[in-house]
Image (spheres, grey):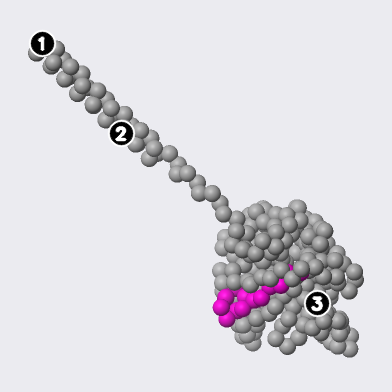
Amino acid sequence: MILIKKTSFLRSKKYIYLFTFCLIIIAFCNSCQSPIEEKKVSPLEKIKDKKVKSLLEKTFKKTGGLENWSSKKSIKFKKYFALFDSLGNTEMSVYQIHEYNYSKGEEINIKWLKGIKKHLLQSKNGKIKKTIDGKIDSSAKPISLKNTILSSTFVVNIPFNLLDEGIVFEHEGIDTLNDGAVVEVLRADFNPEAHNNHSTKDTWWYYFDKEEHHLVGYMVKHADHMSYVKNLSFTEVDGFTFPVKRKSWRVNKNREILYLRAEYEYSDYKIEK
């Protein structure tokens, strides 16, 4: 009888050791497993207004896809623009090469010729400089260089940069432009005093085609004037839609045209994904 009890005790002890060993193995295996990836939250989730969110979703899809745009490594294109005064005289015209690289931080290069001199405006990891024939342009004002970089990149990044921090939106319903185009209107207010990524304190009205959802144009209220910009033609490159020809007019608060202020033409878009 005593022997039976001793044998039962030994068996019980053996099972305890075996059970403990199994728990250790399970714990070890669990520690070796990759952690469960957190579900990615779309940047659109921060948009609380349902109408604004729906409009942005549609235009992102139409323009090439937010995820595709976010994963690009670089974008290059050529840009021509001319500025005119109120009498129609040409103030300036220039051809530029724009190169935006996002693979290692952020590097923006804008190159052009003025006469025979080579101009380069560069922003690299937040530091901005301008050179002429390789020498620092000491006459260039830092705030002017910063605004040039921000405005140049802002236009080509529309509509995807409408998810930038600090923009205050309001969906203003349906409107009809002077050429008869029916559009959804999205108002956006920018405040550089509160947000360093905003260049100037402006109000924008973005006009999206009511049926196709691409950006037809926009009106901007600056400190001392109002501009109305119309995308006249588009091109598709690697699934993304970009403007080819654009015009900008000075207008009054009712969007009535006062005079042609600028013409733009873009070409040779190249995207690296």
The residue under label 2 is which amino acid type? Ile
Extent of the magenta region: 185-199
The residue positioned 60% from the left and 82% from the top of the image is 142
Q: Can residue 93 be seen in this view?
A: no
Quadrant where the N terminus is found in the figure: top left
Label 1 sits on a secondary structure element that is: loop
Marks 1 and 3, how far apart in space? 102 Å
* Labels 1 and 3: the sequence-earlier one: 1
Would you name the residue on which mark 2 appears? 24
Identify whether 185 is placed above or below 103: below
Q: Which of 204 and 113 is in front in this view?
A: 204
The residue positioned 79% from the left and 61% from the top of the image is 214
Would you name the residue on which mark 1 appears? 1
Which of discs 1 and 2 lies nearer the camera? The answer is 1
Horizontal placement of 188 versus 249: left or right? left
Would you name the residue on which mark 3 appears? 228
